[in-house]
């Protein structure tokens, strides 16, 4: 997947870091990403060492044309 096919989300409401059990975001992959009331993407990557304060998501445009996806 090319870099333009992902969204980078900067988290400002928490402190980046890691823990012995893994990422604080473990299990969040696949969660919806909203901008206001609009669905703009889906979380796709749970960083093992979440120290940058950033998450990666796939934009709706990357999968909206797939016939298996329906709104």
Image: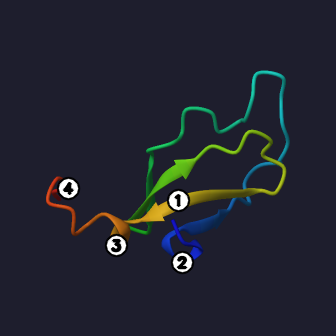
Q: Residue at x 49, y 72 (%)?
A: 5
Give neighbour class at mark 4: few <14, some 14-19, many 20+ (Cα, 10 Å).
few
- Find disc 2 in the rendering and name its residue: 4
Secondary structure, mark 3, is helix
Quarter of the image where one finds residue 71: bottom left
- Find disc 1 in the rendering and name its residue: 57
As drawn, is 6 to the left or to the right of 55?
left
Viewer-nearest residue: 38 or 4: 4
Secondary structure, mark 2, is helix
As drawn, is 60 to the left or to the right of 46?
left
Query: Nearer the observer, disc 4 or disc 2?
Result: 2
Q: CA distance from mark 1 to mark 2?
A: 11 Å
Q: CA distance from mark 3 to mark 1?
A: 12 Å
Viewer-nearest residue: 8 or 13: 8
Q: Residue at x 76, y 22 (%)?
A: 21
State yes or no: discs 1 and 2 in contact (Cβ < 8 Å).
no
Q: How is the image coloured?
A: rainbow
Q: CA distance from mark 1 to mark 4?
A: 17 Å
Viewer-nearest residue: 59 or 17: 59
Say which label, 1 or 4, has the lower sequence index: 1
Give coordinates of residue 3: x percent, y percent.
59, 73
Q: Residue at x 63, y 43 (%)?
A: 46
**Which label sits on residue 69?**
4
Give coordinates of residue 53: x percent, y percent.
77, 56
Give neighbour class at mark 3: few <14, some 14-19, many 20+ (Cα, 10 Å).
few
Q: Residue at x 55, y 68 (%)?
A: 7
State yes or no: discs 4 and 2 in contact (Cβ < 8 Å).
no
Say which label, 4 or 3, has the lower sequence index: 3
Give neighbour class at mark 2: few <14, some 14-19, many 20+ (Cα, 10 Å).
few
Say which label, 4 or 2, has the lower sequence index: 2
**Which label sits on residue 61?**
3
């Amino acid at each position: 997947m090319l870099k333009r096919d992902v969204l980078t989300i900067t988290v400002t409401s928490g402190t980046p870091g890691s823990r012995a059990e893994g990422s604080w975001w473990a299990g969040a992959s696949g969660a919806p990403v909203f901008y206001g009331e609009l669905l703009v993407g889906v979380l796709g990557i749970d960083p093992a060492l979440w120290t940058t304060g950033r998450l990666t998501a796939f934009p709706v445009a990357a999968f909206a044309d797939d016939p298996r996806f329906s709104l």
